[in-house]
Image (cartoon, rainbow, N blue to C red):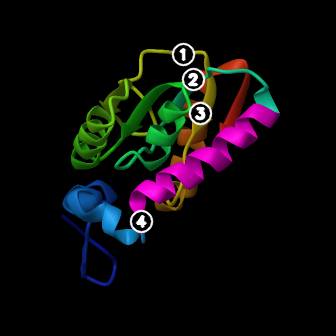
């Protein structure tokens, strides 16, 4: 636990999301419907921009898997990672229940050190992941993400 300038405790984002992982779906009126809606919208945009399928996609802030599951349901090859071990464990369980083959890793998006693969068609970082970063950390994260893209790859946030 860290303390802010005001003396109050500041919880690290991964600790917050670890604690929330088992209940995160409750933030949605219907989480399964949200997976389908977001997956449909994002996959339509990817088809317009990259006009081929299946794609290799790195979702580097996957949380409990909302977008990663949607990408995999559309037939894409997905690698999903997050800083929160609890969120990754939940996402992995959700993918298994749905019979989806998604590779998961716990890693920091500012380094992506546990992601060995390069040359992704798409690197995605969705929802509220980027606002957790300071300007220097955002610059590091963008360098790490761009290092994972193929030369004509697409970054979506």
- Marks 2 & 1, CB-CB < 8 Å contact: yes
Q: Secondary structure of the magenta portion, mostly?
A: helix
Residue topped by disc 1: 118
Left or right: 19, with 46 as reference point: left
Residue topped by disc 4: 30
Whether residue 67 is visible to the viewer of this picture, yes or no, is yes
Residue topped by disc 3: 123
Give the spatial CA distance, label 2 vs label 3.
7 Å
Position of 28 relative to 86 (above/below) = below
> Residue, x 49% and y 58% (percent of image)?
34
Q: Earlier in the sequence, mark 3 or mark 1?
A: 1
- For the N terminus, the image quarter is bottom left
Give the secondary structure at mark 2.
Answer: helix
Q: Is residue 112 magenta?
A: no
> Residue, x 58% and y 52% (percent of image)?
38
Question: In front: 9, or 78?
Answer: 78
Position of 6 relative to 10 (above/below) = below
Left or right: 90, with 48 as reference point: left
Left or right: 53, with 32 as reference point: right
- Where does the image place residue 67, in percent across and percent down from the top left? 50, 45
Q: Which residues are magenta?
A: 30-48
| The label number, if any, that marks residue 148 in the structure image | 2
Q: Earlier in the sequence, mark 2 or mark 4?
A: 4
């Amino acid at each position: 636990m860290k303390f802010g300038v005001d003396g109050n405790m500041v919880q690290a984002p991964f600790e917050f999301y670890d604690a929330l992982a088992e209940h995160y779906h409750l933030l949605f009126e219907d989480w399964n419907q949200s997976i389908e809606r977001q997956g449909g919208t994002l996959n339509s945009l990817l088809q317009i921009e990259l006009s081929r399928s299946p794609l290799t996609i790195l979702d580097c802030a996957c949380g409990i898997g909302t977008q990663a599951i949607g990408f995999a349901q559309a037939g894409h090859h997905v690698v999903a990672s997050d800083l929160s071990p609890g969120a990754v464990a939940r996402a992995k369980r959700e993918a298994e229940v749905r019979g989806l083959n998604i590779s998961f890793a716990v890693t920091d998006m500012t380094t992506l050190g546990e992601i060995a693969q390069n040359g992704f068609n798409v690197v995605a970082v969705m929802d509220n992941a980027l606002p957790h970063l300071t300007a220097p950390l955002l610059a590091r994260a963008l360098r790490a993400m761009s290092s994972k893209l193929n030369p004509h790859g697409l970054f979506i946030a």
